[in-house]
Image: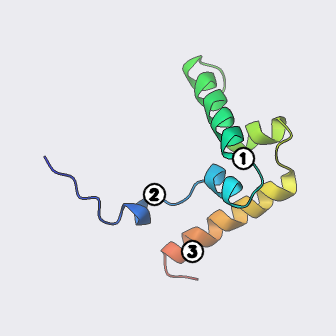
């Protein structure tokens, strides 16, 4: 079975962690550590935490930076729908 990879970039848009790295708020290493912690929580049956929650808990990002990241996610979604 072959897969059609055309349009994958349209379906899978940048996520919050990627945007945080692109904006220079965190490093790639910090993102990877936070993702690792999130997955470890999940497989250890601890309550799921959002990535931004983990990053703020480590004081690697501020609430103001989270607002900027969410704004960028919203803009990206609107662009994908042709509304921006």
* Mark sitting on residue 78: 3
> Which of these two is toward me, 14 or 84?
14
* Mark sitting on residue 12: 2
Q: Is the Cβ of the residue at disc 3 closer than 8 Å to that at disc 1?
A: no
Mark 3 is surrounded, within 10 Å at the Cα level, by few (under 14), some (14 to 19) or many (20 or more) other residues, namely: few
Residue drawn at (82%, 48%) of the image: 61
Nearer the observer, disc 2 or disc 3? 2
Left of 4 or right of it: where is 50?
Answer: right
Nearer the observer, disc 3 or disc 1? 1
Q: Can you say whether 32 is above or below 11 in the image?
A: above
Disc on the earlier residue, 3 or 1: 1
Q: Quadrant of residue 56?
A: top right
Disc on the earlier residue, 2 or 3: 2
Mark 2 is surrounded, within 10 Å at the Cα level, by few (under 14), some (14 to 19) or many (20 or more) other residues, namely: few
Q: Can you say whether 64 is above or below 28 in the image?
A: below
Left of 23 or right of it: where is 9?
Answer: left
Q: Position of residue 16 (x, y in %)?
A: 64, 53
Residue bearing the label numbered 1? 27
Where disc 1 sits, the SS reads loop
Marks 2 and 1 sit apart, C-alpha to C-alpha, by: 21 Å
């Amino acid at each position: 079975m072959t897969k059609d990879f055309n349009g994958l970039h349209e379906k899978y848009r940048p996520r919050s962690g990627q945007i945080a790295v692109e904006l220079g708020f965190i490093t790639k290493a910090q993102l990877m550590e936070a993702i690792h912690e999130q997955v470890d929580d999940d497989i250890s049956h601890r309550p799921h935490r959002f990535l931004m929650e983990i990053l703020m808990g480590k004081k690697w990002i501020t609430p103001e930076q989270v607002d900027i990241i969410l704004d960028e996610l919203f803009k990206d979604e609107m662009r994908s729908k042709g509304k921006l």
